[in-house]
Amino acid sequence: MRSVLLILLTLILSVPGIAYGQKGKKITITGKVVDISNKPVAGATIFIDKKKTDVVTDQNGSYSIKVKPGASDILVFSLLSGATEEKINGRAEINFVLKDHSGSGNISKNVSSISGVVNIKDSAIPVYQDIYDMIRGRVPGVEVSGKSIKIRGTNSLNVSTEPLFVVDGVITKEIDDISPETVKSIEVLKGPDASIYGTRGSNGVIVITRKTGKD
């Protein structure tokens, strides 16, 4: 009887996954991202279960990503075209249509809580004299001298070293008129995150979201 048990135990241990639980293999999801005009959206970032990945869409709007079997949601986000989310439900091909296509760089509220935003607390507002002082005091990874801002770790392809500014989803050249007490959050983008702006984002991007009446 003992010999039989030893033989059965040996067989069980020799089969991968039986003794210690089988580890599921990652599945590959592919798809294409287009805007409301059915044009490919390049540089859109893929999120899995609200977590940002390094995967972005190519020039044809196509992507390919490997996810764990237990993954539930996949979200695609473009600063220029918005965001949308789908349930994975075991699908190997998921295509997206980004409907927030205004051409002005609107940012979807769907990803406002998952982009690593620096939120500004009301108690800290009186400390800051202006928006530049606020960025200097609250946002890591930037150098502020007067009204000149430089994001550390960016390689300038332009004569200027100033970053691109996006305020409430709209690209702008000036932020002087923004009062610190109206700011809800500030986010710094650089490298792949800023690449969707092309050369305009080569010095990095500072995304400022102001409070609304609901905040």
Image: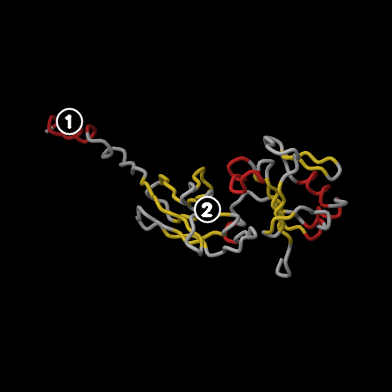
Residue drawn at (59%, 48%), measured in percent from left and top? 196
Residue drawn at (53%, 65%), measured in percent from left and top? 99
Between label 1 and label 2, give the one nearer the viewer.
2
Which percent across, then down, holds residue 126? 86, 54
Image quadrant holding the C terminus, namely: bottom right
Q: On the image, numbered disc 1 is attached to which residue?
A: 6
User: Label 1 to label 2, Cα distance in Å?
Assistant: 47 Å
Which percent across, then down, holds residue 50? 52, 53
Q: On the image, numbered disc 2 is attached to which residue?
A: 50
Which percent across, then down, holds residue 65? 42, 46
Q: Check the image and name the residue furthest to the right.
A: 129
Which residue is at the front of the view, 48 or 200?
200
**Is 27 left, or right, of 122 in this rendering?**
left
Rendered image quadrant of residue 21 = top left
**Is 62 left, or right, of 159 in this rendering?**
left
Residue drawn at (59%, 53%), measured in percent from left and top? 114
Q: Amino acid at mark 1?
A: Leu
Determine the secondary structure under disc 2: loop
Q: Amino acid at mark 2?
A: Lys
Determine the secondary structure under disc 1: helix
Rendered image quadrant of residue 179 = bottom right
Q: Quick check: marks 1 and 2 in contact, CB under 8 Å? A: no
**Is 22 left, or right, of 153 in this rendering?**
left
| 21 up-or-down from 80: above or below | above
